[in-house]
Image (cartoon, grey):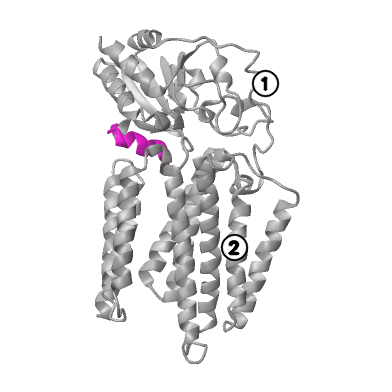
Amino acid sequence: MNILTSFAYLVAAVLFILGLKLLSSPRTARKGNITGAMGMLLAIVVTMLDRNILDYTFIIAGLVAGGSIGAFLAYKVEMTAMPQMVGLLNGFGGAASTLVAYAEYLKMTAREGGMAAGTTGDVWVTVSLSVLIGTITFTGSMVAFLKLQGLMKSAPVLYKMQKQINAVMFLATVALAVMFVLDPTDPLPLIAIIALSAVLGVTTVIPIGGADMPVVISLLNSYSGLAAAMTGFVINNSVLIVSGTLVGTSGLILTNIMCRAMNRSIFNVLFAGVGADYEGAVTESVERTVVRYTPDDAAFILENAQSIIIVPGYGLAVAQAQHVLQEIATLLSADGRTVRYAIHPVAGRMPGHMNVLLAEANVPYDLLMEMDQINDDFQSTDVALVVGANDVVNPAARSKKESPLYGMPILNVDQAQTVMVLKRSLNPGFAGEDNDLFYDKKTMMVFGDAKGTLTNLLQILKK
C-alpha cells in the first residue's frame, strides 16, 4: 500500500508540473487547468484511502460543504469580482495550512506525556514556518480582498515608523520561533507567533496601493504555496510538499515578471507606499477640455480603418462587455480589417485578468498579443481602441517624475493615427493620475457604459 501511495503521489506531482507547463500559454491553459485538477483529485483520493483514517464523517462533510460553496462561487461570482475571489482563496489556503500545522502540533505533543517520540527539531521549525506564513497569507489576503471590493480605501495606508514596527514584529516572531523550537512543550510561543503573524499580514499589505494589487495577489498566492509546503513537511506528505513548492516558486516567478512589467522592484511595491498622498490627478482636468464623439462617429472611423488594435482594461470587465466587443472584432475582421488585442501584464486587478476575460468571450488565442510583441506596431496602426483601460496607457508614466506611474512601461496607444477611448468619465485610474491621452487632439472620447456603447456601435456597423 505504501508503494502504491508513493507511486500515485508521483503521478499527481507529474500532473501538477504538466498542468503548470500547459497553463503558460492561453492556447493550452484549459488543458492545464484540467490536468492540474486531475492531479489534485488523484492526490485527494489516495490520501483518503490512508489506513490511519478512522472516521470519514468530517472528511465527507468538509468535501460536501466545501465543494458546494466552491461550485456556487464559481457559478455566481462575476469576472469583475474574480480578483477578490482569488484573494479569498489564497487566504483560505494560508488559514488551512495554519490550522493543519497547529492541529498536528497538538497531536504530537499529546503523545507520550507531552512529546512525540522521535520528533526532531526540524519538525518544530516547519511548524513555526507553516503557522507564520499561513497566518500572514490569511490576514494579508483579507486586506487585499477588502481593498479590491471597495470596503477599504485602495490608497496606501501609512503611519509613522511603519517599516520599523513591522521589522520589530518580524524579529519578535523569529525570537518566538527559536523559543518554541527549544521547548515545544510550551504552546504559548506558537500562539504568540500566530497572533503576531496575523497583525503582520495586515500591516504589510495596507501600505500597498490598489494599483499594485495584481502583484500583491500573485505574491500572496506564492505565500499560500510556501505555507502548504511547510505543512507538508509537518505531516510528512510528499505530494503536499511538491504542490506547495510548485505554487510558491511559480508565484514568485510571476510576481517578478509583473514587477518587471511595471519597471519596479518587489521591494518598491511592498515598502514604498507609492501613491499614498498623491494629489496631482484632477487639478488639470478642470482647465482642459476633451472632444466628445458618438458611436456613429466611432463607426465611421472604424469602417475606414485597415488595422485596429484593441486595448482592454478593468472597465471592460466591469461592464461585462467582452462578448459584444468580440462580435465587433469578428465583424471588422470579416470585412478584411486586421484586428488584434494588446494585453498589458498588469491590466485588470489580478495576473492574467484580461486573458481570462477574453477567453470567456472565445477570442482566438492568436489575437491576444503581449505588450512586448505589439508595442512597436501602434505607430503603423490606424485605430487604437481603448475599452476601460487607463493607467496602462497613460503617457505620464514616461515623463511625469512625480507620478506614481513614472517608469512603468505602457502600451504605446498614443502613437496610433487615431485613438478611440470608451470610458464612463474622465476619472483617473487606480493610481490616481489624470490621463493626458484623453486630451490629445487625435483622441476620440466616447463616454458611457462600455457595453451600451459597444452594442450601439455593433448595430451601426451591421447596418
Quick check: 16 left or right of 207?
left
Is there any visible trace of residue 381 in the rendered image?
Answer: no
Highlighted range, magenta: 351-364
Pointer 2 residue: 197
Q: Residue at x 27, y 55 (%)?
A: 35
Outermost right residue: 160
Circle on res. 283: 1
Q: Residue at x 71, y 62 (%)?
A: 168
Where residue 257 appears, x then y in whole percent? Answer: 49, 45
Is there any visible trace of residue 257 in the rendered image?
Answer: yes
Question: Which picture quadrant has residue 17?
Answer: bottom left
Q: Secondary structure at mark 1?
A: loop
In space, the residues marked 1 and 2 are separated at their CA atoms by 41 Å
Where residue 380 appears, x then y in whole percent? Answer: 43, 17
Asked if the residue under mark 2 is in contact with the one under mark 1, i.e. CB atoms within 8 Å, the reply is no
Q: Residue at x 55, y 38 (%)?
A: 211
Outermost bottom residue: 113
In the image, 97 versus 354, the foreground residue is: 97
> Mark 1 is on which residue type?
Thr
Where residue 206 appears, x then y in whole percent? Answer: 61, 48
Please, is residue 172 above or below residue 335 in the view?
below
Please, is residue 288 above or below residue 237 in the view?
above
> Mark 2 is on which residue type?
Ser
Q: Secondary structure at mark 2?
A: helix
Of mark 1 and mark 2, the one earlier in the sequence is 2
Where residue 39 appears, x then y in whole percent? Answer: 29, 61
Q: Residues within 10 Å of mark 2 (few under 14, many from 20)?
A: many
Residue 356: in magenta span: yes
Q: Quadrant of the C terminus?
A: top left
